[in-house]
Amino acid sequence: MTAELIISDSLLSDVGLVIFDKDGTLIDVHTYWANMVRLRVESLNRQLDLTGQHFVGLMESMGADARNMRVKPTGPVGIEPREVVLQAGADYLAANGYGHQTSALLQAFAEADTLSETRLHDFIKPIAGLSALLDSLRACQCRIAVATTDRTDRAILTLRHLEISGLIDLVAGADSVHAAKPAPDIVRLICDRLHVPVNHTVIVGDSVADVRTGMNAGCLASVGVTSGLTDARALRQVTPLVVPSIANIHVACPLSASD
């Protein structure tokens, strides 16, 4: 079956699959990623004994506003894949006299992953309306997927914590494809695995990269939400379908011919 999505004054019909970004779309991007960056830098600090200046500088290089514990609109954390964030940290350390610390960063990222699993309640805050929207899509038997620049296992951990993993048909992280967003690879992978044509698929995300991913893949529509890192003006430059959050997406189940 398919669903109808009501986005502001627009009606999207014959939607067989909705693909959601994770950070800034399903969960609060600032709470999650600013805390993850801090954990990573705290771990690295135990290895390198960073000065206060460079503790803050390293957080900033990875894309976290250390003072306000928010993610910068330009990232790279929360926008780019893990490898890009790690390289940003490595470049900062090398430029500030700490040498080549890729191995130390890899260890710090791994330690932060482990530590965060005991703090998920503090790190993961769902966007309002999440469960209601997913329930409405499932009621129409519309397929649901998550496409994220985070690792697949980390995304699955988040969905399990939110107790919504049973509503999601497929989760794909940046580690699932060769080219990350805005390349169309992740959408094509999901559509192929769920056997839903891309022209019956809608992607929902909080970044220009999310929107362009759907456009590059040939999706029925790309919907931008301003609950993450990108404002409405920037999103409207690439799509007319922009709403404050997923709570503003409404679902209807079309009547079948036998009804």
Image: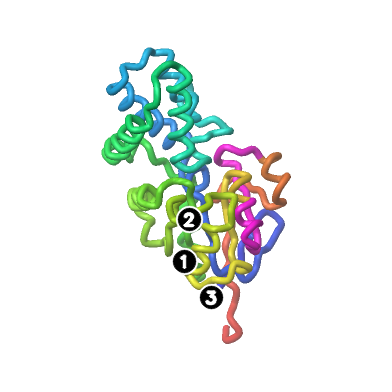
The residue stretch that appears in magenta: 212-231
Q: Locate residue 249 relative to residue 195 in the image: left or right.
A: right
Q: Locate residue 236 relative to residue 37 in the image: left or right.
A: right
Can residue 64 be seen? no
Residue 51 at x, y = what percent?
37, 13
Report the residue marked by disc 3: 1
- Report the coloring of the rendering: rainbow
Which mark identifies residue 177? Answer: 2
Residue 124 at x, y = what percent?
39, 41
Q: Secondary structure at mark 2?
A: loop
Q: Is residue 138 above or below residue 67?
A: below
| Quadrant of res 13 | bottom right
Q: Secondary structure at mark 1?
A: helix
First along the sequence among labels 1 and 3: 3
| Residue most extreme to the bottom | 258
Quadrant of image for the C terminus: bottom right
Which mark identifies residue 138? Answer: 1
Residue 177 at x, y = what percent?
48, 55
Amino acid on which the number 2 mark rests in the picture: Val
Residue drawn at the location 33% of the way across and 40% of the way down: 120
| Along the viewing direction, whichever of 106 and 187 lies nearer the viewer | 106
Q: Locate residue 28 relative to residue 240 in the image: left or right.
A: left
Q: Secondary structure at mark 3?
A: loop
222 drawn magenta: yes
Amino acid on which the number 1 mark rests in the picture: Arg
